[in-house]
């Protein structure tokens, strides 16, 4: 079998092979199913293999007697087989009962029909099954949709999203990760049912947004799905078509944001910062007498917007601190001088300084190309790397510490910390060498004053 992605090669893991062949040997049907089959067709790497089978959980226990089996979701028919360190989820064919909370079925019943099991899934591209030999079961034209690059809900799209509203965000996540277009009726149903997302936990929504922003095709996905993304980040709707009216920009705010997000490395904190960095512009626009647009104070407003989002969607403290700081300082330019870079590295820390530079590079690359300077960022990063390896930019790299100053006669307490910071600033500004003897003498001088 071949197509857009060439000849299909189904290279399943040893654990999946063992699970399928063992179930087949005991007289049951068994298939690799869902995203792993989709990714094999697309020649994408597969990290997890899910198996579906006609065997009930009790029958599976008997089939895998003697093997390590964990009852991870027994009431929903799921066992996890641990095979040579690999976890393989195996689930009985099932039909879902009524969905009452836009997320979970009120009941689950087992079935002997693979087709019945497949039709309860979200999108056609995820409703594919492979038997471990040569048989691909494709009851809903999922392979054709993969070839066409289409995300299409199985059956009635509105019903699929009423069953599980998180599928709306899964759809745009697949668009970002795979670069696929969302089929017209499916997208219309997503937009029509956006309010169902109010029933979904904030953490589950955040997990989908994190995957969305890290997608390979995030620019396309933002621009094509801004109405859906706007349910989570309302400013996105306002950013669409918002002209910046400045010679420094060639895109509206949303397109600029999409390009900048695409241009930073696919790291969650960087991508989130890029997505939010200019959200404050829609509230800060002014125009001068010449008709040129300005966005004074927009970083502060963007910082408040991203802080609210990160708190509402319950992000961890590291992510909150990193993203908020990046957004706060994204418009703060650094001069191409060692002193300026050392001051900025002292303020942010080396790691965050380099992350901020990546964000600023991407931000700049999404503006008018005649003002973009790759050389500027290369110089800044080269200076920073030199400072990191050779120079003093924080208290850790200062040639004296608190004990040294106490031994020299500086009393413990608040004054000690103040003197250390004065010494650090003077070293950074190259007013004094980073040498112990000179620093101790200067500390005693400061103390006397």
Image (cartoon, grey):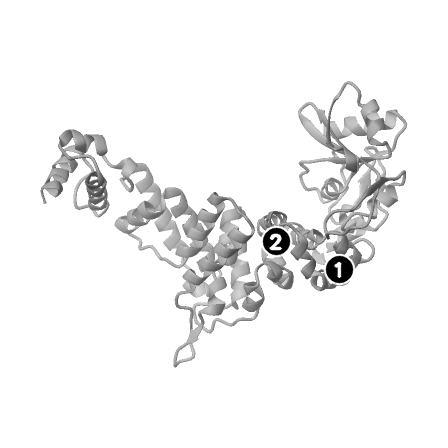
Quarter of the image that includes the C terminus: top left
Which residue is drawn at the image coordinates 39% and 52% (left, top)? Answer: 377
Label 1–label 2 contact, CB within 8 A: no
Q: Residues within 10 Å of mark 2 (few under 14, many from 20)?
A: many
Question: Can you give x and y, in whole percent of width and height, for residue 292 in the image?
Answer: 42, 76
Q: Is residue 194 above or below residue 42?
A: below
C-alpha distance separating marks 1 and 2: 19 Å
Question: Can you give x and y, in whole percent of width and height, for residue 159 in the image?
Answer: 79, 56
Q: Which of the 4 quarters of the picture holds residue 137?
A: top right
Quarter of the image that includes the N terminus: top right
Question: Can you give x and y, in whole percent of width and height, for residue 296 in the image?
Answer: 39, 68
Task: Spot the residue most to the top.
Answer: 66
Q: Which mark is residue 217?
A: 2
Question: Can you give x and y, in whole percent of width and height, for residue 406 in the image?
Answer: 17, 31
Q: Residues within 10 Å of mark 1 (few under 14, many from 20)?
A: many
Q: Is residue 159 above or below residue 266?
A: below
Q: Is residue 145 above or below residue 11?
A: below
Dot 2 falls on a residue whose secondary structure is loop
Dot 1 falls on a residue whose secondary structure is helix
Residue 62 visible here: yes
Residue 383 visible here: no
Q: Is residue 249 above or below residue 264?
A: below
- Asked whether, in this view, residue 258 is left or right of residue 57, the answer is left
Residue indicated by mark 1: 186
> Which callout, 1 or 2, points at the residue further toward the start of the chain?
1
- What number of labels is visible? 2
- Asked whether, in this view, residue 29 is left or right of residue 362, the answer is right
């Amino acid at each position: 079998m071949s197509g857009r992605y060439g000849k299909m090669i189904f290279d399943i893991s040893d654990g999946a092979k063992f699970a399928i062949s063992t179930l087949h040997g005991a007289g049951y049907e068994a298939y690799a199913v869902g995203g792993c089959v989709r990714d094999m067709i697309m020649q994408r790497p597969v990290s997890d293999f899910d198996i579906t089978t006609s065997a009930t959980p009790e029958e599976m226990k008997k089939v895998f007697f003697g093997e390590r089996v964990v009852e991870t979701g027994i009431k929903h028919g799921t066992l996890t087989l641990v095979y040579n360190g690999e976890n393989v989820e195996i689930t009985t064919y099932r039909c879902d009962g009524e969905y009452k909370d836009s997320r979970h079925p009120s009941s689950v019943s087992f079935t002997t029909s693979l087709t019945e099991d497949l039709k309860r899934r979200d999108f056609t591209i995820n409703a594919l099954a492979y038997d471990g030999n040569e048989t691909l079961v494709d009851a809903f034209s999922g392979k054709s949709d993969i070839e066409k690059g289409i995300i299409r809900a199985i059956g009635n799209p509105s019903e699929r999203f009423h069953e599980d509203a998180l599928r709306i965000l899964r759809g745009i996540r697949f668009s970002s990760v795979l670069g696929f277009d969302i089929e017209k009726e499916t997208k219309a149903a997503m937009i029509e049912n956006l309010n169902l997302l109010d029933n979904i936990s904030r953490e589950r929504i955040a997990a989908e947004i994190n995957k969305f922003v890290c997608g390979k095709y995030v620019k396309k996905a933002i621009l094509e799905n801004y109405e859906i993304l706007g349910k989570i980040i309302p400013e996105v709707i306002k950013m669409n078509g918002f002209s910046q009216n400045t010679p420094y920009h060639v895109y509206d705010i949303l397109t600029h944001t999409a390009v900048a997000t695409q241009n930073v490395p696919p790291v969650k904190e960087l991508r989130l910062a890029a997505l939010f960095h200019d959200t404050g512009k829609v509230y800060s626009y002014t125009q001068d007498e010449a008709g040129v647009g300005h966005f004074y104070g927009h970083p502060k407003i963007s910082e408040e917007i991203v802080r609210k989002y990160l708190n509402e969607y319950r992000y961890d403290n590291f992510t909150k601190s990193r993203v908020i700081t990046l957004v706060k300082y994204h418009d703060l330019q650094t001069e191409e001088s060692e002193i300026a870079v050392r001051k900025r590295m002292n303020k942010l820390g080396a790691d965050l300084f380099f992350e901020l530079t990546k964000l600023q590079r991407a931000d700049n690359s999404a503006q008018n190309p005649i003002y973009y300077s790759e050389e500027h960022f290369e110089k800044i990063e080269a200076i920073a790397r030199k400072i990191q390896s050779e120079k003093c930019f924080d208290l850790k790299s200062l040639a004296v510490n608190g004990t040294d100053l106490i031994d020299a006669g500086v009393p413990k307490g608040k004054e000690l910390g103040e003197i250390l910071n004065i010494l650090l600033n003077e070293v950074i500004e190259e007013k004094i060498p980073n040498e112990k003897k000179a620093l101790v003498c200067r500390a005693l001088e400061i103390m006397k004053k």
